[in-house]
Image (cartoon, rainbow, N blue to C red):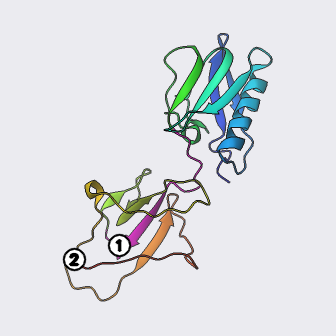
Amino acid sequence: MNVSSNNNVIYFQENGQSKSATLTPGYYDTGTLMAEVAAKMSAASGGYATYTVSQSALPLRLVITSTQQFKFMFGTLTNSAAGILGFLPLDSPELANSHAAQNMSNLAIQRSFNISVNSESKFVDTVGRLCTFLVPVLGHTGSLALYEPTIMFQQLITFTQPVSTLNIKVCDDRDNQLEMFADWYIILGKM
């Protein structure tokens, strides 16, 4: 599930009152997420305002609009939905009828794959775990992706001693080891 009890609360303020809307945990795509956000925020408003959610043209950011002025209180991080909606974990600076997310919504179950080779560590993921290679997940769950690092983010490993065996471990961003039964391959090249 890409929305869980750990990331499903939308904190906002309207009519001088702090409110929260709780999304039902489950699997969402962008369309079902937009409908859920609109329904839950409208319900949490208690009849004061009606909310709608749309997605902008490129860069595909969520825009949340209300019939009344409101602001997000995402500085409160307890189970916040800010990240999956594309908002920064900050309170909105002012009341408005519409707020656009700063980033695209992120419904990926994993945010990165961390590959460790022979316990060599070069990168640190978003929660501080060390790994040899870091592969960001740029699509939603179930999408196909080919990752080729840019010249500005080359990922190389240099062994200081001869190596005859490679021990490779692939984990998600929560340090769960991934099962690599099918549809996976890693190309290693010697420079």
Residue 122 appears in view: yes
Figure check: 19 above or below 57 = above
**Label disc, if present, on residue 22 of the rendered structure:** none
In this view, the residue in front, 80 or 71, is: 71
Q: Residues within 10 Å of mark 2 (few under 14, many from 20)?
A: few
Name the amino acid, label 1: Ser
Residue extending farthest to the left is 160
* Rendering quarter of residue 122: bottom left
State the quadrant of the C terminus: bottom left
**Label disc, if present, on residue 119 of the rendered structure:** 1
Q: Residues within 10 Å of mark 1 (few under 14, many from 20)?
A: some
Figure check: 75 above or below 8 = above
Question: Does the stretch in magenta take in 3?
Answer: no
Residue 78 in the figure: left or right of residue 126 = right
State the quadrant of the N terminus: bottom right
Residue 187 in the figure: left or right of residue 1 = left
- The x, y position of residue 181, in whole percent, is 58, 79
Range of magenta residues? 104-120
Figure check: 108 above or below 14 = below
- The x, y position of residue 103, in whole percent, is 49, 37
Residue 183 in the figure: left or right of residue 45 = left
Name the amino acid, label 2: Met
Residue 70 in the figure: left or right of residue 169 = right
Q: Where does label 2 land, which residue?
A: 191
- The x, y position of residue 105, in whole percent, is 56, 41
* Rendering quarter of residue 38: top right
In this view, the residue in front, 167 or 108, is: 108
Looking at the rendered structure, the secondary structure element under dot 1 is: loop
